[in-house]
């Protein structure tokens, strides 16, 4: 996925028509100005308009997002509490660095939560198979985005697919903890190397999860979700000589 070069936010504000920065500039429909600003910043990082380690300046962000500093300041506090931003004396507020060790920890926590969610969701779908239509609608959205290689929209649909599974599980604690990870996961999606090969495979991968839920294959889901979440991470890891010889 092509990434825009890092530019200061005042330069972005002077050129708001740039298509590669539209995901950042288009304010999402989260509830409350602070949450909307927080979501816009996360989308900016996920799309590459903002980079890990980049310093954020309140005045520039306020101009870019067309809002006052009061809700923006609250948004920065929200993201700092979630670990997406970091503030240090004399250096200001920066986007956290999403290094490999941090990404691995996020994936590990996500696997544990989604294993619990999948067990509850499988039982729920057995009781009410019609609820699977919600996953089917998300898959249709994902497929449309994949046909245009729109990776930000694919990532958002991917996240919504797994959010719907957590909701279907009926486990409130899992939903709360999963939502605490959701913004991190969206940023990770943006960092992963994705190409046409991924666009062709992402729909079958999610449809497989959907079908396993429909058939109540709990044991299979327990193993599949780890493979599903770590598939791109494992592809990026260097292979040993023995692995290379076998391929």
Image (cartoon, rainbow, N blue to C red):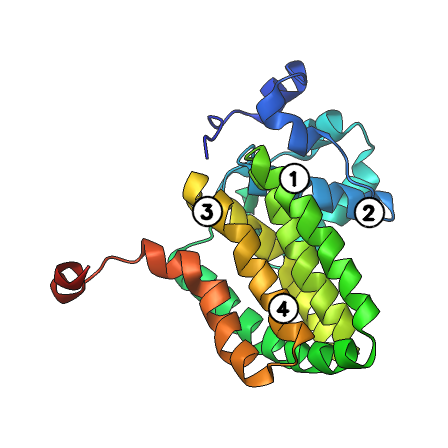
Instruction: Please report contact status of discs 4 and 3: CB closer than 8 Å, yes or no.
Output: no
In this rendered view, identify the residue nearer to me: 58 or 14: 14
The answer to which image quadrant residue 176 occupies is bottom right
Instruction: Calculate the distance from the C-alpha at mark 3 to the C-alpha at mark 1.
Output: 14 Å
Q: Position of residue 86 (x, y in %)?
A: 57, 52
Lower position in the chain sequence, tag 4 or tag 2 = 2
Identify the residue position indicated by label 4 in the image. 211
Horizontal placement of 30 versus 102: left or right? right
Instruction: Calculate the distance from the C-alpha at mark 4 to the C-alpha at mark 3.
Output: 20 Å
Instruction: Calculate the distance from the C-alpha at mark 2 to the C-alpha at mark 3.
Output: 29 Å
Instruction: Please report contact status of discs 3 and 1: CB closer than 8 Å, yes or no.
Output: no
User: Residue 144: which numbered mark, if any?
Assistant: 1
Q: Secondary structure at mark 2?
A: loop
Identify the residue position indicated by label 2 in the image. 30
Q: Is residue 246 above or below residue 21?
A: below
Total tally of numbered discs in the picture: 4
Q: Is residue 198 above or below residue 14?
A: below
Q: Secondary structure at mark 4?
A: helix
Instruction: Calculate the distance from the C-alpha at mark 4 to the C-alpha at mark 2.
Output: 31 Å
- Residue in view at x 57 percent, y 40 percent: 146
Q: Residues within 10 Å of mark 3 (few under 14, many from 20)?
A: some
Identify the residue position indicated by label 3 in the image. 198
Q: Residues within 10 Å of mark 1 (few under 14, many from 20)?
A: some
Lower position in the chain sequence, tag 1 or tag 4 = 1
- Residue in view at x 63 percent, y 44 percent: 143
Mark 1 or mark 4, whichever is nearer to me: 4
Q: Position of residue 234 (x, y in %)?
A: 35, 61
Q: Is residue 147 above or below residue 198?
A: above
In this rendered view, identify the residue nearer to me: 131 or 184: 131
Q: Is residue 94 above or below residue 18?
A: below
């Amino acid at each position: 996925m092509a990434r825009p070069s890092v530019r200061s936010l005042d330069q972005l504000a002077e050129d708001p028509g740039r298509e590669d920065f539209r995901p950042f500039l288009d304010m999402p429909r989260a509830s409350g100005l602070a949450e909307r600003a927080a979501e816009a910043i996360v989308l900016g990082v996920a799309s590459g308009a903002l980079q890990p380690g980049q310093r954020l300046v309140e005045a520039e962000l306020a101009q870019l997002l067309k809002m006052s500093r009061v809700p923006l300041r609250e948004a920065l506090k929200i993201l700092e509490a979630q670990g997406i931003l970091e503030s240090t004396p004399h250096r200001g507020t920066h986007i956290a660095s999403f290094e490999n060790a941090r990404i691995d920890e996020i994936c590990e926590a996500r696997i544990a939560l989604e294993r619990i969610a999948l067990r509850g969701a499988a039982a729920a779908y057995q009781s009410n198979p019609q609820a699977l239509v919600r996953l089917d609608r998300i898959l249709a959205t994902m497929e449309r985005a994949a046909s245009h290689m729109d990776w930000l929209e694919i990532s958002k649909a991917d996240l919504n697919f797994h959010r719907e599974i957590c909701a279907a599980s009926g486990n409130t604690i899992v939903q709360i903890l999963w939502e605490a990870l959701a913004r991190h996961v969206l940023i990770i999606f943006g960092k992963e190397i994705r190409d046409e090969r991924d666009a062709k495979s992402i729909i079958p991968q999610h449809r497989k999860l959907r079908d396993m839920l429909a058939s109540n294959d709990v044991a299979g889901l327990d193993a599949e979700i780890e493979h599903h979440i770590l598939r791109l991470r494992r592809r990026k890891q260097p292979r040993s000589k023995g692995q290379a010889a076998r391929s």
